[in-house]
Amino acid sequence: MASGDGLILRVKPRGAALTLRQAGGIAAVAARHGNGLLDLTTRANLQVRGVSEARLAAATVELDALGLLDADAGAEGRRNVLASPLMGLDPSAAGDIRAAVASLEERFAAATALAALPSKFGVAVCGGGLLPLGAVAADIRFDAGPDWRFALRLDGEDAALAAATPDAMPEVALRLAAAFVAARRRDPGLRRMRDLVAAEGAAAVCGAAGLDGLVGVAPPPGGAAAHRGAAPGIGALVLGDGTTVLGVAAAFGRLDAGQLDALVTAARRAGAAALRVTPWRALLVPGLSAPGASGLAASCADAGLVVDPADPRLRVAACTGAAGCARGSTPVLDHAARFAGLLGPGQAGAGIALHVSGCAKGCAHPGAAPLTLVAAAGRYALVADGTAGDEPVAAGLDPEEARRLLKTTLRWDRHP
């Protein structure tokens, strides 16, 4: 995938898990073959940035040797499955969803008949527990209930439509995806499942998928399990079995190879064996003792990573800007770091207060934010309680003017 700073190599961990060897290998690939920068994405992927055409083959060989690549690009593109990042580890979850998630990944990767699926079309499986998926969006979603049946939801319809067992989930999801592909052949304007639901209704989509015999009656009304905040799970989290998980974030989802390598080295020293990747642009290090987590947190902080859930940078969303996007014209990440300092220490778990976008697309935070700064040609427009594409309340601000406006005229305490 091309970007403003070279090619991007996407690493899509299976089951949201990476061994420390794999994570260290990704850091090495970024240092040797890229520009040394990596992104954590909202789809629980890692991206190695700045790879040149000349280094692409070598980088691909090394990632493949680590067991991180699919058979082909099509298989990788279809394997879009998000799951609760603590699956199989959290005793407070409804159950262990790892087998169902693995089956979903395998079957979508193998489903060549679904080649026409949009690149971002995905499935989410939430097992509940301490870190549920909350408001994470997906075209098809399954939420665990207390009876180990999963409420089926489609994007664009809040109500549960049916209930499926873990064994049935892969087939249910595949049939729904096939129904979407068929509908898209009739209407190429359909971009995602929410468009089809808006056009035909969720019940009609399920009917076209032929789910009779695969699903049961929908559970009683109730929303998906929720979490608080923009980046849940940062800092130390004690599980029901007494072990500790350390959540580590990178400011605005961007870290360098040295930081990832430092995390891997310190995690190994603390007794960890693996990492989990979250859709909140963060990493989890499970299997720690309390002293081990404390030592690891100190090492991560020394490396410039975020381990304090009240860190104001967690409340700011920002894209790569001019440094890595052809659409960008402004050094958004540098400015976002300055703007974040205006927030001061925030409430642990507070949501996004500020979105700094390099253009009107708003990729870093597609939804509305209390405050959004939209860059164009080195200047900013300010949007209040909206998205990057909405009408601004002020425009033509240079970075210093934007900073002063944020500092002196906006009441941050209205956006806890």
Image (spheres, rainbow, N blue to C red):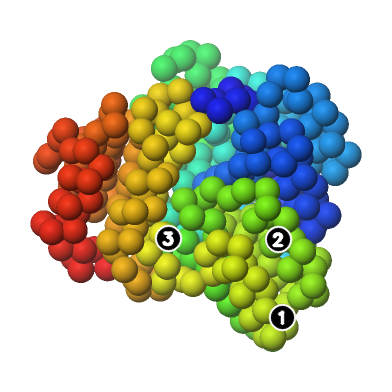
What amino acid type should be assigned to the residue bearing mark 3? Leu
Q: Which residue is mark 2?
A: 262
Q: Quadrant of the C terminus?
A: bottom left
What amino acid type should be assigned to the residue bearing mark 1? Gly
Q: How many labels sit on residues?
A: 3
The residues tagged by marks 1 and 3 sit, at their Cα atoms, a distance apart of 24 Å
Secondary structure at badge 2 equals helix
Q: Which residue is mark 1?
A: 292
**Where is residue 301 drawn, in percent x and y?**
57, 69
For image coordinates 18% across by 45% down, the residue present is 401
Q: Which residue is mark 3?
A: 314
Q: Is residue 334 placed above or below 331 in the rendered structure?
A: below
**Where is residue 408 drawn, in percent x and y?**
13, 59
For image coordinates 61% across by 42% down, the residue present is 37
Q: Is residue 138 placed above or below 390 in the rendered structure?
A: below
Secondary structure at badge 3 equals helix
Q: Quadrant of the N terminus?
A: top right
**Where is residue 27 drawn, in percent x and y?**
73, 47
